[in-house]
Amino acid sequence: MRRYAIEFVDLFLCIGEEELLRGVSGKVEAGRIVVLIGPSGAGKSTLMSVCNLMRSPTAGSVYVEGREVRDWPVRKLRQKVGMVFQSPTIFPGTVEENLAYGLKLHGQSLHDPRSLLHDIGLEADLLSRPGAELSGGQKQRVALGRTLAMKPDILLLDEVTSALDVHAKLEVERTILRLHEQRHTSMLWVTHDLEQARRVADVVWFMAEGRLVETATADSFFAHPETLQAQRFMQTMAEGETR
Ligand SMILES: Nc1ncnc2c1ncn2[C@@H]1O[C@H](COP(=O)(O)OP(=O)(O)OP(=O)(O)O)[C@@H](O)[C@H]1O
């Protein structure tokens, strides 16, 4: 049987009466970048949050490399499935301490901080700088580096460039793509930036109202989305850009 990086099977997530996810099924092939798009409140972040058990499914299953998430020891799961958010978390201390933070929680240490710094495109002299003094783009790269230090096979990226200016956004995006080429990390990447989605996606998943409405290769989706819901979403987004 073929192993997928992540597989969702008829996944539901409810909070009280509200269904945040409604029967999501889909497979992320290993080494692929799947970009999740859709209107605000569609359930994109919620879908990612079940992959490392930040939230638990109400019904259905999520498999990470063939093993159901609830059967993974949580620490191992979170080492395998790294997550980076819109607003980078920077802890008190130097850049080096920030990069080592996750490993330290797992009782490990960072062996080659300079090489990691190089991987995330930062100069070596930043290692001893307080993290709080960095620019927004540098902070986001440190947050990415902290996650990468754990050597995840799967990365969940939740609007990681939306708080950055255009220059920093492209820099961080390029860093992620370079790392993807080097490490073949599988990625689920939420973005509201359709130009970014076009640049980075192998596959597009379109979500609306808690459902995975359409999945397609990026080329085919951007040439012509199949469902009316996705067509309308793309049109609304295009109108927003020209306004
Ligand atoms: N703790 C919660 N309790 C109740 N409802 C919640 C909770 N967290 C999220 N929701 C609701 O779940 C729905 C999906 O939220 P989610 O953040 O996954 O959407 P999204 O597609 O990522 O949106 P955005 O693009 O705005 O980030 C929204 O309607 C949201 O209000």
Image (cartoon, grey):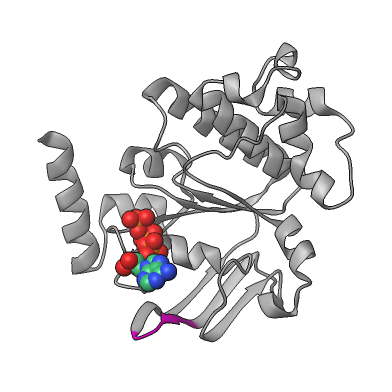
- At a point 58% along the width and 73% down the height, the residue shown is 7
Give the position of the C terminus as an image quadrant: top left
Vertical relation: 232 (above or below) 73:
above
Q: Position of residue 204 (x, y in %)?
A: 41, 57
Give the position of the N terminus as an image quadrant: bottom right
Q: Residue furthest front?
A: 92
Q: Quadrant of residue 95?
A: top right
Q: Quadrant of ligand 1?
A: bottom left
Vertical relation: 207 (above or below) 195:
below
- At a point 79% along the width and 63% down the height, the residue shown is 76
Q: Position of residue 28 (x, y in %)?
A: 56, 64
- At a point 85% along the width and 36% down the height, the residue shown is 110
Question: Left of 144 or right of it: where is 195?
Answer: left
Question: Left of 35 or right of it: where is 213?
Answer: left
Q: Quadrant of residue 166?
A: top left
Of residues 226 and 123, the one drawn nearer to the viewer in this rendering: 123
Q: Main SS of the magenta segment? A: strand
Q: Residue furthest left?
A: 243
Vertical relation: 227 (above or below) 111:
below
Q: Does 21 lie within the magenta span?
A: no
How many numbered marks have been drawn onto this rendered protein structure?
0
Q: Quadrant of residue 79?
A: bottom right
Residue 169 appears in the rendering: yes
Residue 206 appears in the rendering: no
Of residues 226 and 229, the one drawn nearer to the viewer in this rendering: 229
Vertical relation: 136 (above or below) 87:
above
Q: Which residues are magenta?
A: 11-17
Q: Position of residue 195 (x, y in %)?
A: 33, 38
Q: Position of residue 241 (x, y in %)?
A: 18, 37
